[in-house]
Amino acid sequence: MKKSLLPSKICPVCHRPFTWRKKWERNWPDVKYCSKRCAGDRTAKSRESQD
């Protein structure tokens, strides 16, 4: 399958597009972040905006 045909999303933390991966096959609807780093940074960014 060509990469251009794979579904993609935009990461809410870094605002970069990321495409479907085999490891996300079962829970693609629940995937929100492109990486573990962005998933961890989401809490740091929300804390900064509250201060």
Image (spheres, grey):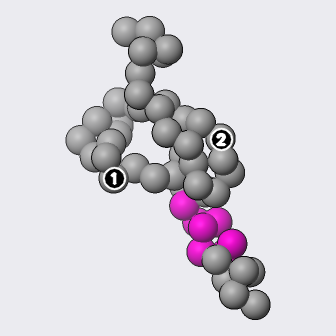
Q: Residue at x 54, y 61 (%)?
A: 39
Along the viewing direction, whichever of 44 and 15 lies nearer the viewer: 15
Indicate left or right for 49 with 35 as reference.
right
**Tag 1 secondary structure:** helix
On the picture, is 47 further left or further right than 28?
right
Residue 6 placed where, x, y %?
A: 41, 21
Q: How many marks?
A: 2
Residue occupying the far top of the picture: 2
Q: Is residue 8 above or below residue 16?
A: above
Q: List x then y, in percent, for residue 36.
A: 54, 55
Q: Residue at x 55, y 35 (%)?
A: 18
Vertical comparison of 12 with 45: above or below: above
Q: Amino acid at mark 2?
A: Arg
Give the amino acid at mark 1: Asp
Indicate the quadrant containing the N terminus: top left, top right, bottom left or bottom right: top left
> Mark 2: which secondary structure?
loop
Magenta highlight: main SS: helix
Residue 24 located within the stretch drawn in magenta: no
Query: Residue at 59% across / 74% down in the picture?
Result: 43
> What residue did someone put label 2 on?
16
Please tell me which of labels 2 and 1 falls first in the chain.
2
Asked if the stretch drawn in magenta spans residue 43, the answer is yes
Separation (CA) of disc 2 from disc 1: 17 Å
Whether residue 35 can be seen here: no
Mark 1 crowdedness (10 Å alpha carbons): few <14, some 14-19, many ≥20: few
Q: Which mark is residue 30?
A: 1
Residue farthest toward the left in the current orientation of the protein: 26
Q: In the rendered view, would you say 40 is above or below 46? A: above
Horizontal arrangement in the rendering, residue 19 relative to residue 41 (left or right) = left
Give the magenta range.
39-45
Mark 2 is surrounded, within 10 Å at the Cα level, by few (under 14), some (14 to 19) or many (20 or more) other residues, namely few
